[in-house]
Image: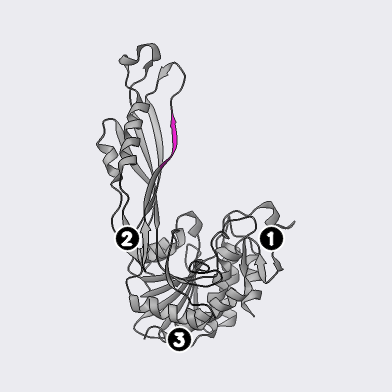
Amino acid sequence: MSVTDLTRELAAIPSHEDETAAGDFLEAWLRRETPAEVTRDEAGNVFARKGAGEETLALVGHHDVVEPADSQVGPGGEYVLEERDGRLYGRGTADMKGAVAAAAIAFREADPAGELVFASFVGEEVGGVGARHAIDEGFAPDYAVVGEGSTGYSAPGVTDVAVAHKGRRGSTITARGERAHASEQEAGENAIYRASDAVDVVRDLEPPAVEVAGETLGGSVVVTEIEGGTAMNVVPDRCELTVDERTVPGERAALERVADLEGVAWTVDQDLPPMECGDEAFAEAVREAADGAQPGAPELVTKPHATDAGWLSQAGTDCVICGAAEPGEAHTDAESVSIDVLERCADLYRRTAESWPR
């Protein structure tokens, strides 16, 4: 079975609400097509292992997707796949069942230099549920190639190797006051005014930035929502702000300062960690594999989006990101992936597995 055929079959399986059927398919394919030890954990993650050595390399992806558009679903509930102009169109083709298929093909074909693991997680789109469960249960490869998109970063059509990405911290600032009639505002304490003081603190923060692979990876912090008040003639006793923060490896913006204001509390709702590869030799080995698999000249780059590589990196795995998806394809109504690039990724994953660990 080719990477195109495997992508087509896997991507047709609905997995935006329940990943079970996609996991069943992957598990059955790996058992049928490889002699590997294949397992499934309680979360629904699919693993396969082969080879031996003191160090482990994992090819990592996820088989959940975001909700498809109506045009991407067939009459029987299956996802619609179309092939035209050398691309496969459909939900999950780019993010990231195409790369999962490429990793599975590479896993089947490779004669690995050490222990090789195939891992496809559930729940990446909802905060890394599967990756976090696997890590908690002891999943700890020494190295990982995470197949999220890295094509088209240095030049159109070139599959690069991302050695760092931003994280995302989402939080809520809650300002509390004392309700009063608006005609007697001095009798109360205006929560919106307190929230405004918190906004001033956020606006004055200097987000950190780091230099990685010759690029500046800069963080950001911005107030994105505000809700408060009950009526035109009532001094509000509560106001809530939502903050979107893009984090970078290392320091964070000092957002906790808002909690020093009177009547203001700060809570973290989501914290997806950033990633930076700590092993230059591993990153260069993957870049060399990518170079050998394509006519273009891949570079070491950075990526703006959080991935499961953040969780793995936080747990001690040296990660890079290398995959077929191009910027602007994931989560769109016209999501697609290049068939040539899928074949390229299968080749470069195999090359990496056969050359690393050294």
* Distance Cα–Cα, label 1 vs label 3: 36 Å
Closer to the eye: label 2 or 3: 2
Label 1 Cα neighbours within 10 Å, binned few <14 / some 14-19 / many ≥20: some
Tag 3 residue: 354
> What kind of element bears circle 3?
helix
Magenta stretch holds residue 108: no
Kindly tell me whether residue 285 is visible in this rendering: yes
Q: Position of residue 143 (x, y in %)?
A: 38, 75
Residue 157 as seen in the image, left or right of residue 354 = right
- For residue 354, which quarter of the picture? bottom left
In the rendered view, tell whether residue 290 sits above or below residue 260.
below
Q: Residue furthest left?
A: 260
Q: How many marks?
A: 3
Q: Quadrant of the N terminus?
A: bottom right
Identity of the residue drawn at 48% across and 80% down? 291
**Residue 274 seen in the current view:** no
Outermost residue on the right side: it is 75
* In the image, residue 229 above or below residue 344: above
Q: Which residue is mark 1?
A: 78
Amino acid type at circle 2 is Val
The residue tagged 2 is 210
Q: Which residues are magenta?
A: 223-228
State which quadrant residue 73 falls in. Answer: bottom right
